[in-house]
């Protein structure tokens, strides 16, 4: 089987790594990939915003299956174009990708199918903005409707800041203004094959830059899988009150696709509430999730594109996995690129794996950074402490000038879980 992965981050490195372990692979490519992916797959230079160029290059590779990582090419119809060429593809078409690319569309879907979520207003004018802000107590939550690379949501207790942000967004987009929810977050990934669905174990992302969940929002500084606080009872409630109605809604609206739906949740004391949908795997959740999946990844992917997920039984490693993002100095603010990487840790017998995110190989073979979040170090362990020790030790062995990482990924959730009644 010849497989092509589309994307450039640590999520895509984890996908390529998972595919590379299958004995069924006899060709593995990534468009465009990074320095780490290049050790496992043929990498092809391309621009993820140029769909015509991407389609031509992928077609030339002649894959049996394509797995699309990021949202932008999905929103631009890459999966439709590949399928129209007869190439089996994991990822929704442009229409279904609206569940992510329009938060207004996502909220309407939740309302239509009784999916629990925050009360909200769809805001198109300044007048509607002031009405919506008046309807809620602070802090306010304002969401730009369109794709924003994780930067479209403002949570603030400052009315003037909320108003200014809302008015700025309304210049060229619409808004969802919603009730502020308290609780803890979880990311639920569900594979869809067009008819059947398969739920993966839950993960939790850590969005804030600073330890203790303070500081600025980032693209995600690490993840834990499974989520220590989601025990069987809470997980069953997620399956019954969220996953089932989401799948029912997709079927009723003709929105079922072959790919992944990512349900972003806030678990409140009144139960799970959906924050958003994404139509792809998450980053850095994927880096913690995939090392726990023991099924052959080609078999699993093939079941998605042939409508046979009902025949798949997930085989999940009981170990906890923690992914820790190693970032450039200054991130999520401005940072330097092209910093030489001095040292990288080796993968260790199934308990530690390093994924590259933003790297390239320079002319002299030296690995250089190319972005803000540069690597994900993933530790696995029978206990939380073992997983954390392995992840943090590996992360500290990633050495380039200014490299930093959060040492507390999963810690708050783990400590809270210890306080739950037995
Ligand atoms: P979203 O893109 O909708 O997932 O929002 C990005 C982040 O904003 C989430 O991961 C939450 O941390 C936060 N957020 C979104 N909606 C709410 C809400 N209603 N209440 C509190 N925090 C929220
Ligand atoms: N981890 C959140 C995302 O991938 O958008």
Image: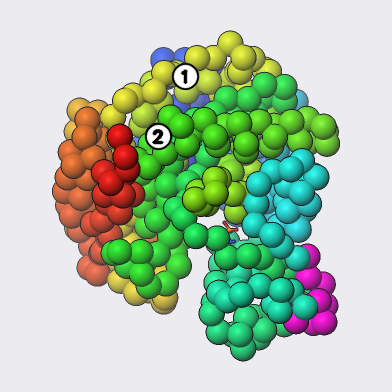
Residue 245: in magenta span: no
Ligand 2 within 8 Å of disc 1? The answer is no
Percent from the top left, x then y, of residue 115?
69, 43
Residue 129: in magenta span: yes
Percent from the top left, x then y, of residue 388?
22, 45
Figure check: 121 above or below 227: below
Tell me where the magenta segment starts and ends, as one range: 122-130
The picture quadrant where one finds residue 368 is bottom left
Q: Nearer the viewer, residue 249 or 87?
A: 249
Distance between the alpha carbons at the discs numbered 2 and 1: 18 Å
Figure check: 150 above or below 11: below
Q: Which residue was labeled with disc 2?
A: 231
Label placed on residue 34:
none
Percent from the top left, x then y, of residue 410?
31, 49
Residue located at (74% from left, 31% from top): 248
Residue located at (43% from left, 60% from top): 207
Q: Quadrant of ligand 1?
A: bottom right
Q: Nearer the viewer, residue 341 or 332?
A: 332
Q: Judge the density around disc 1: few (<14), some (14-19), many (≥20) Cα neighbours within 10 Å.
A: some
Extreme residue toward the front, this view: 421
Q: Nearer the viewer, residue 403 or 196?
A: 196
Q: Is residue 168 left or right of residue 293?
A: right
Q: Secondary structure at mark 1?
A: loop
Residue located at (64% from left, 43% from top): 279
Q: Which residue was labeled with disc 1?
A: 314
Figure check: 404 above or below 276: below
The picture quadrant where one finds residue 378 is top left
Q: Secondary structure at mark 2?
A: loop
């Amino acid at each position: 089987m010849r497989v092509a992965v589309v994307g450039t981050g640590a999520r895509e490195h984890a996908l390529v790594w998972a595919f590379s372990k299958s004995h069924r692979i006899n060709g593995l490519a990534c468009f465009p990939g990074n320095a780490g992916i290049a050790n496992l797959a043929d990498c092809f230079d391309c621009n993820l915003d140029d769909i015509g160029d991407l389609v031509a290059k992928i077609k030339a590779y002649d894959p049996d299956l394509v797995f699309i990582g990021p949202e932008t090419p999905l929103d631009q119809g890459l999966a439709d174009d590949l399928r129209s060429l007869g190439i089996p593809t994991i990822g929704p078409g442009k229409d279904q990708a609206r569940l992510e690319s329009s938060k207004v569309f996502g909220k309407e879907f939740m309302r239509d199918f009784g999916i629990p979520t925050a009360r909200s207003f769809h805001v198109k004018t300044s007048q509607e903005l002031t009405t919506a802000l008046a309807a809620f107590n602070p802090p306010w939550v304002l969401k730009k409707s369109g794709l924003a690379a994780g930067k479209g949501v403002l949570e603030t207790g400052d009315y003037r800041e909320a108003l200014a942000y809302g008015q700025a967004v309304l210049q060229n987009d619409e808004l969802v203004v919603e009730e502020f929810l308290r609780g803890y977050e979880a990311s639920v990934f569900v594979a869809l094959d067009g008819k059947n669905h398969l739920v993966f174990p839950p993960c939790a992302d850590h969005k804030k830059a600073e330890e203790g969940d303070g500081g600025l929002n980032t693209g995600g500084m690490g993840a834990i899988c499974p989520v220590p606080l989601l025990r069987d009872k809470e997980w069953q409630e997620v399956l019954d009150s969220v996953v089932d109605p989401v799948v029912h809604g997709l079927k009723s609206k003709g929105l079922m696709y072959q790919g992944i739906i990512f349900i972003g949740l806030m678990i409140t004391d009144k139960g799970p509430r959906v924050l958003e949908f994404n139509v792809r795997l998450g980053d850095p959740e994927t880096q913690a999730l995939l090392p726990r999946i023991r099924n052959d990844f080609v078999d699993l992917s093939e079941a998605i594109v042939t409508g046979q997920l009902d025949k798949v039984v997930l085989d999940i490693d009981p170990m906890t996995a923690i992914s820790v993002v190693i970032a450039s100095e200054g991130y999520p603010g401005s940072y330097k690129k092209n910093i030489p990487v001095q040292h990288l840790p080796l993968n260790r017998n199934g308990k530690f794996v390093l994924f590259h995110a933003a790297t390239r190989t320079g002319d002299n073979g030296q690995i250089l950074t190319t972005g803000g979040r540069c690597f994900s170090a993933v530790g696995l362990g029978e206990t939380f402490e073992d997983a954390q020790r392995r992840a943090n030790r590996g992360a500290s062995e990633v050495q380039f000038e200014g490299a930093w990482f959060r040492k507390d990924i999963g810690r708050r959730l783990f400590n809270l879980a210890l306080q739950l009644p037995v």
